[in-house]
Image (cartoon, rainbow, N blue to C red):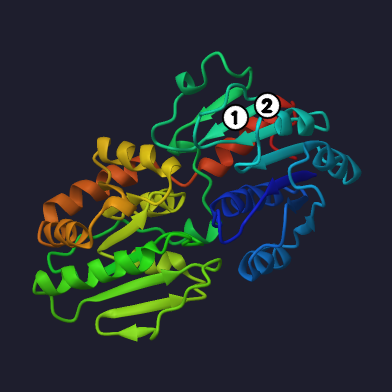
Amino acid sequence: MLAIRADANARIGLGHAMRCFALVEGWRARGGEAVFFSGGAVPDQVAARLEQAGIGFRVLEEPDDGCEFAEAARRCGATWLVVDGPFADAGYAAAARAAAPLLLIDDAADKETYPADLLLNQNVQAGTSSYEGRTKARILAGPRFALIRSDLRQDLVERGISETPKRILALVGGADPNGYLARLTEAGAAALSEAGITGGQVDAVVGPANAWRPEALISGSVVYRVGVRDLGALIAAADIVLSSAGSTVWELALHGTPMILGASVPVEEPVGAGMAAQGAALYLGRLRECAPERISAQTVRLLKDAEERKKLSRAAAALVDGRGVERVLDAMLELTGEGSTP
């Protein structure tokens, strides 16, 4: 039994929960069972995914109490715990770990200690040296361990780079507490116009935890997408993506998508900068400091430069192969001597 502890809401988005869901998919494919614990209600789309997959869901009464999660995990017979989220400080992790071996998922490498058996940081800037002297856990670092849902790993084909691009995808993850989606969308539409592209379209994804809605779902070259069930199709159709530098970056990279990234929160800043350093994305910096005109200018430049889009696509695709879930599960089961079966 795998016990997951993660949240999904309008403040932190869906990234923590959905990468844990990807891990659960792989665990169940190997014959294991799982239960998902959260500190509060989750968006309907997340709840529906869990229900359709046959994964139990429970809300904890004390979301910041690792002992409560440990006791709940014991009651359900958990043999592994997975903890992912900003609530997971050293005290929480240590209390939870008393119940079973712990996989701790981290993004920032900013804590003094990391009590865990496995420590996963799937971001491009991560390395074992990021945690030197702060944990005894085995460290799984970098995008080769990226946890990506099965629906986004299916039907992958080598991306073709069009000399006449027409589709821009704008997204900021499952939530948008700072209201950046509209800024990226408007900049994308302006770029299509400035580049002289006729028949172009911006697909703007309104995440499940985003309460904001545009006045009209279709306006000029913009189509706002609400309740998206096939994100992979939108990614595959996009010539360029304007995105925040959250966990969606690895889904985009898997598809070899030319991307322009901005940081919507501080933890995304090293991801965006790291992707740019790898030649796998253009990086705008902090979105709150980035004028729409600058976003448009970068987008126009990329729309007009097929060779640059090809380079970005190849570099991004080289970072992620879609086997991260399997690698993480193998590490978990190797540690407990269980071979390939949960």
Residue 252 % position (x, y): 38, 54
Residue at image coords 26%, 40%: 276
**Dot 2 surroundings within 10 Å: few (below 14), some, or many (20 or more)?**
many
**Res 116 label:** 2
Residue 234 % position (x, y): 38, 69
**Residue type marked 1:** Leu
Residue at image coords 14%, 59%: 297
* Residue 50 relative to residue 22: left or right: right
Q: Residue furthest right?
A: 75
Q: Quadrant of residue 93?
A: top right
Q: Quadrant of residue 158?
A: bottom left
Residue 50 % position (x, y): 69, 62
Element marked by disc 1? strand
Element marked by disc 2? loop
**Residue type marked 2:** Ala
* Residue 247 relative to residue 84: left or right: left
The one of 118 and 14 positioned closer to us in this rendering: 14
**Res 119 label:** 1
* Residue 309 relative to residue 271: left or right: left
**Dot 1 surroundings within 10 Å: few (below 14), some, or many (20 or more)?**
many
The one of 170 and 198 positioned closer to us in this rendering: 170
Asked whether the beta carbons under mark 2 and mark 1 sit within 8 Å of each other, the answer is yes
Can see residue 167? no
Residue at image coords 38%, 86%: 216
Distance, label 2 to label 1, CA atoms, is: 6 Å
**Quarter of the figure with the C terminus:** top right
